[in-house]
Image (spheres, rainbow, N blue to C red):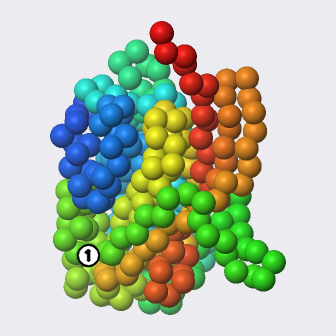
Amino acid sequence: MAVSRVNTGTDLELGTWTVTEDAVRQYLEAVGDTQPAYFDCKLAPPVALAAWTLGALLKKLALPSGAIHSLQELESCGGVHFGEEVRATAYPGRPRRRGNLEFLTTGYTLRNRNGEQLLTGKSTVLIVSPSEEEAAGEGSLQTSAAPPGNSGISTADGKRPQSSLPVITRTITQSQLNDYSQASGDDNPLHLDPAFAASTQFGGIIAHGMLTLAFVGEMMVAAYGRSWLETGLLNAKFRGAAHLGDRLETWGQVAREEARPNGRSVECSVNVRNSRSGEEIINAAAAVLIKPTRPSS
């Protein structure tokens, strides 16, 4: 399906499923995330919920092989507990064209049986016109839209300060991509098929964008635990690709804190970088609401 043929203005029902502990465990094992908070709180990772929704959306739209993830937003509205049934609905926007790239931004919501929102967000994917694909370098895949915040914070001497949030490091392997494809439902051949990937502007297999974004989610849950699972907000721009063998590293700094009647709002500038080349893979802003601790009875 060409992006221009997407029926905008019509809600797309992506399906209903139960978020099981086994599905969460499979996802976390594929990502390499060993944080205990998910099982202590019995809450699913927000990035996993967005990834499952995106996987269902890509299958529903039947976009051409090689569709590329450009932007991702998500907001957790209380969290999704193990065993909870969710219904996913998508809202495709009008496709936009820029040169040889066509962009499609789709909003989505996850709701429970009572119709209450559990997760909201947007995903932007882009298609490179086949006849012009060879002319499109990775720089062409960047959009002009940037997330709020500035993950390029530097000190007076121009150096980036150390991360104040827990640092997550991963080396991308084909085995991990295979496992993540199964766990997320995203079987784009760009991540799995060496011959296909070699024919693209990337010249070889690259990691799923949502896999690299999962490292940010892991960093945030390591820092904020239940608060991230219940109230996390993320606005991310995918700036580059992670290839097999690349070692990725997360970075995060608190950019702003504000007292609110219902708790303390914390906004963070975060990113994911290739630790060997220094290339920024993801530039993002994250936020969380830390609610007052309830006194024990």
Residue 52 seen by the camera: yes
> Can you identify the residue that label 1 sits on?
173
Residue at the image point whose x is 37% and y is 81% from the top: 246
Helix, strand or loop at disc 1?
Answer: loop
Q: Nearer the viewer, residue 80 or 204?
A: 80
Residue 186 seen by the camera: no
Residue at the image point whose x is 28% and y is 30% from the top: 82
Q: In this view, does 167 lie above or below 77?
A: below
- Residue 268 screen position, x and y as percent: 64, 53
Residue at the image point whose x is 40% and y is 84% from the top: 202
Q: Which of the 4 image quadrants contains residue 163?
A: bottom right
Q: Few, some or many C-alpha atoms within 10 Å of disc 1 (few <14, some 14-19, many ≥20)? A: some
Residue at the image point whose x is 30% and y is 37% from the top: 39
Q: Which of the 4 image quadrants contains residue 255?
A: bottom right
190 left or right, relative to 117 = left
- Residue 204 screen position, x and y as percent: 32, 85
Amino acid type indicated by mark 1: Thr
Q: Which of 184 and 33 is in front in this view?
A: 33
Check the image and name the residue furthest to the front: 297
- Residue 35 screen position, x and y as percent: 35, 49
Give the quarter of the figure containing the N terminus.
Answer: bottom left
Check the image and name the residue furthest to the right: 156
